[in-house]
Image (spheres, helix red, strand yellow):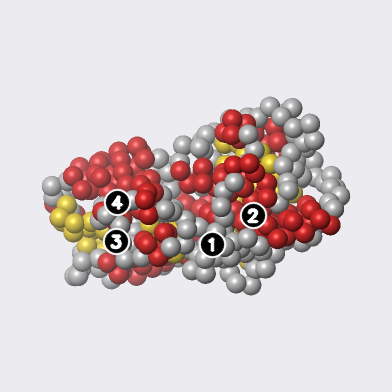
Amino acid sequence: MKKKLLSLVLAATMVSSLLVGCGNDSTSANSNSTQNASDDVVVDDSASVDDSASTDNAADSSSSSDGIQVGVVLPTKDEPRWLQDQAQFEKLLGDAGFTSQVLFSQGSSATEKTNVETLISQGIDVLIICAQDASAAAAAVEAAKAEGITVIAYDRLITGTDAVDYYVTFDSFSVGAAQGQYLIDNAPSGSGIPLYLYSGAVTDNNAFIFFEGAWSVLQPKIADGTFVIANSSEAVALQDKAELTRDEEASILGQITTDWDFNVAKSKAEAHLTAVGAELKGDVVVLGPNDGTARSIADVFATDKDVTSYVVTGQDAEIASVQYVIDGKQSMTVFKDTRTLAADSVAMAVSVLNGETPTTDSTYDNGNKDVASKQTDIVVVTQDNVKSALIDSGYYDASEFTGLE
């Protein structure tokens, strides 16, 4: 890696800026991390890189005569969550005194690889990447690693390669477990309650971990007859197994995947409700994988005249879904404070650039190695705690919602 000589003044500036908080006590990462922030970040547009450059799929390699120190690659700019991440990266890295570039892969592994190659040509020292496809991204990060670049997998683990140095993530197993437990705690009384399962993309390692967490708490209730799986023959065939192999999980996800796509989720929900009889409708519970798909699924279930009521989960605390939660259209969302996740990633990158060893608190097996990792906590948000979790913490402004009490 190319070594950068940083002045004591710059180092002090970076340390002080990284101690500026990006979360609150209820949403911060584990307390043993010395890199976590404690106050809210106020976005300063002057600290951001040029907007047109950061939103293009590929950047002009001559955009900085001095090169870019930290490159960030995110999956898409079409979902609000990733735009929030972009803003945090630009703010935090700018405040820390480093140049950066944020590029979007727009759902394409080929574009993702091109983005990484572009950032390599700009002279980056650290690559922070949220992979579009967990295995396909291996080739891109191996190219970066070959140039001496430190690779930090962001939010999604990159599998099948030794080229990943660090992983910063929310506790994905806990996300799924929280969703599953919410369905259990808020299901109607009795037994034989129809359960509809949906997942993220089969190319996303996190989708497997989310499902694994949900299955860990739902399976006992499926086995004892509390829930009846309504939309997956593969899940029905495996319903007596508390622990599933990766291949068994893949067989289920192959039937219930939404590909993280609103339209796919809508089409599958419509097809599933069309295929079943009235005995698998009435009062139902639905494992919705994330907010975008949860809204699409909820809209479908809400318009089926044979569905009396539904409980549906989500994650990411997107503005539209928070409004759905307030309005009673979506039951819950798992809040993953991207301010804290981005801050943890930036703290890790700054440690690397300073020649230090980043703070980690766990490891994740990516199939080739145990990747040193930093986990960030989650919060379940319902109608009861929208204000305290999302407004009082400064994540959103109350003016962005209606009907908020």
- Of badges 3 and 1, nearer the viewer stands 3
Residue picked out by circle 3: 405
Q: Distance between the residues labelled 2 and 3?
A: 34 Å
Image-based side of 284 in relation to 260, left or right: left
Residue picked out by circle 4: 402
In the rendered image, the quadrant that contains the C terminus is bottom left
Q: Which of marks 4 and 2 is nearer the N terminus?
A: 2
Q: Which quadrant of the figure has residue 28?
A: bottom right
Q: Is mark 1 on a helix, strand or loop?
A: loop
The residue that appears at 19% across and 56% down in the rendered structure is: 309
Residue 301 in the image, given as x and y percentages of width and height = 22, 48
Image-based side of 235 in relation to 362, left or right: left
Q: What element carries label 3?
A: loop
The residue that appears at 70% across and 32% down in the rendered structure is: 118
Amino acid marked by disc 4: Thr
Amino acid marked by disc 3: Glu
Q: Which of 370 and 122 is in front in this view?
A: 122
Amino acid marked by disc 1: Gly
Q: Which of marks 4 and 1 is nearer the N terminus?
A: 1
Amino acid marked by disc 2: Ser
Q: How far apart are marks 4 and 1 (CA)?
A: 24 Å
Q: Is any part of residue 215 visible from this angle?
A: no
The residue that appears at 58% across and 65% down in the rendered structure is: 38
Q: Which quadrant of the figure has residue 15?
A: bottom right
